[in-house]
Image (cartoon, rainbow, N blue to C red):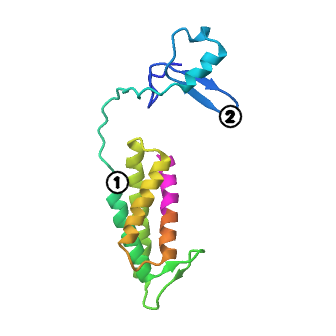
Amino acid sequence: MDATGIPGARGDRCLIFDSEGVVRRAWSFPRSWAELDDESILALLERELPAPIAVPRPERRATARGDHGDVVTAARVAANTRAFFGAADELGHYEVPLCADDSQMAKVGRSRSQMRIAVANYVSTLRAGGVSPERSIVLVKSAVHEGLEQAPECAEHISKDLVDHAVSWCIDAYYAG
């Protein structure tokens, strides 16, 4: 198979071994591979992998939309706001101190929206940079946890809720783009 356009390719061509449960590539093989016996062909899979080849890519200039620090800040603000004004239970109802008014509740909603936007922008930047969805989740969770560490008054159930939402927003943003 021609592998020149495959990211992480370890050669210009590869052999593909396809079975019911596994697909593997052999990157290093002789030109006369088709003449090899079955045992010799299987031995190709045991060879050490060569280093990936550099794939020339056209230069892309884009400005970063979001970063780790934006999510840290948004998570800290959301955690502090929710800790001060009240937190949603599983049904989304807020346990609000008697002193809270509509403007204070709006602050809670705004801080949550700002966190969602920060997560979406960060994920957009990560995705544009070739970061996998799994790694994006790890990086977003790390940023949220860092923000929560800066909000010591935040209750554990609020922290868990913010992390859960951040992961959900991360997945939505990754596959929306």
**Mark 1 = which residue?**
66
Q: Quadrant of the N terminus?
A: top right
- Residue depicted at x 58% and y 29%: 24
Of pointers 1 and 2, the one earlier in the residue sequence: 2
Instruction: Assess whether residue 37 is covered by the magenta stretch.
Output: no
Q: From which residue to which does the magenta span run?
A: 166-177
What is the count of numbered marks? Answer: 2
* Side of 39 relative to 158 (left or right): right
Mark 1 vs mark 2, CA separation in Å: 39 Å
* Residue type, label 1: Gly
Residue 6 pos. (x, y %): 46, 28
- Residue depicted at x 47% and y 44%: 132
**Mark 2 = which residue?**
21
Q: Nearer the viewer, residue 80 or 3?
A: 3
Residue 27 pos. (x, y %): 50, 22
SS at badge 2? loop
